[in-house]
Image (spheres, grey):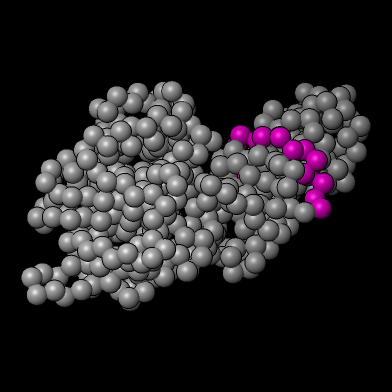
Amino acid sequence: MRIAIIGAGAAGCFAAINIKRKMADAEITVYESGRKPLAKVAVTGGGRCNLTNSFEHVKSMPAVYPRGHRLMERLFHTFDYKDAYRWFEDEGVKLVTQDDCCVFPQSQDAMEIVGTLTRLMRSHGIELKTGCRVRRIERTENLDANKIRIYAGNDDTIHEADTVVVTTGGSPKACGLDMLAPIRLKTESPVPSLFSFCLPGDDITALTGTVVEDVSVAITGTKHRAGGPLLITHWGMSGPAILRLSSYAARTLNATGYKARLTINWMGDMSEAEVHEELYAMAAQNSQKHLSNAYPTRLNARLWTHLLLRSGIKPDQRWGELARKSYNKLTDTLINSIYDMDGENKFKEEFVTCGGVALSNINPKTLECKTCPGLYFAGEVLDIDAVTGGFNLQAAWTTGYAVAEAITNKH
């Protein structure tokens, strides 16, 4: 049996290995347009590879998979984060779980994951063709059997396979799915996900490097909101809270040309009454101190000064001199600061796409195409994407394994 896998990313390589382990006689070829396999895995997590998450703090699947959560819930019965953890540890990769529930190799080196997967592909005799872009896929009807024809390389060399798995990853442009045109699938327009926000001209960018560990952020006028650490950069804002919000609001922000009003509660999920109470308690304990010298511990001196000035309050004023009107204004600034977003800053090699092959095209149990038997999909080429924290790679492991199970059970 000939199996072609298009795309040597996390999902493609994982599927190839698990198919070969279950079907030793299968001839598996992986086609990769780039020069090296697993290029995205090599840079993910800042080169450390956040390969999954413990899910300990995950309240619901939609919270981490804005698109595809129902499918992921189903597929987790086949292969979930615990299975992924065991799978890699069984291959000799020691893993560590951080306080934020992100799972990394103990070596803190993404190349250990790359090396493990490429070693297993070699040892199992899986053929890898790099620098070989697949340009078109189509169904053929031979006298003996239905096969899938692949046109690959600059000369459109024809290859035929009994089974094809498409694992080409996210495509920044709709044309990235052109090879599937003969199959006539429904697709969801690809748009960026997981990006930081540009705030051109805002003086908060002078505080670059400042981190606040727990904030709440929202897009004004929408239901999109997120929480977590926030990082101020020289171009605007980033960090887990912003990246999560960018994932939730991916299509909304794309539709507005990445222009929006960003609301920040610098006090996390504290209410107006709770912030009022904290400020009055601070005033009572520090009545003779300047405002610049006594402030909430979650904020640093530079950010606190910035917020005071946004409130129209002089930093050298004493706490005991603060009028009720100033308390109200400062409270509003702390829980409802407004910043104007104008543009997004993508994570280049770690680019994640919202969109792809619509899930309505596939059998949710097997990930096989409903209209083209023998054609499967796994990974980010599907309309599945997640927030930051190891969830996107977990989707690759889960869908890659599910496809391997489906193919081997069918044959």
Please say whether residue 62 is visible from this viewpoint: no
Q: What residue sits 23% from the left and 72% below the top?
A: 139
Query: What segment is highlighted magenta in the picture?
Result: 201-217
Q: Is residue 406 left or right of residue 340?
A: left
Quadrant placement of the N terminus? bottom left
User: Residue 324: x, y in percent?
Assistant: 83, 43
The single residue placed furthest to the front in the displayed view is 155
**Foreground: 34 or 60?**
34
User: Residue 304: x, y in percent?
Assistant: 78, 35
Q: What residue sits 83% from the left and 26% below the top?
A: 293
Whether 202 is among the magenta residues is yes
Q: Which image quadrant for residue 316?
A: top right
Residue 308 higher or lower than 67, as above or below: above
Please say whether residue 4 is visible from this viewpoint: yes
Q: Which image quadrant for residue 320?
A: top right
**Foreground: 325 or 374?**
374
Q: What residue sits 86% from the left and 43% below the top?
A: 309
Whether 335 is among the magenta residues is no
Q: Is residue 109 left or right of residue 235?
A: left
**Foreground: 363 or 274?**
363
Count of marks overlaid on the render: 0
Quadrant placement of the C terminus? bottom left
User: Residue 54: x, y in percent?
Assistant: 37, 34
User: Residue 115: x, y in percent?
Assistant: 37, 32
Q: In this view, does 242 lie to the left or right of 310?
A: left
Q: What residue sits 51% from the left and 61% below the top?
A: 172
Residue 401 higher or lower than 381, as above or below: above
Q: Which image quadrant for residue 18?
A: top left
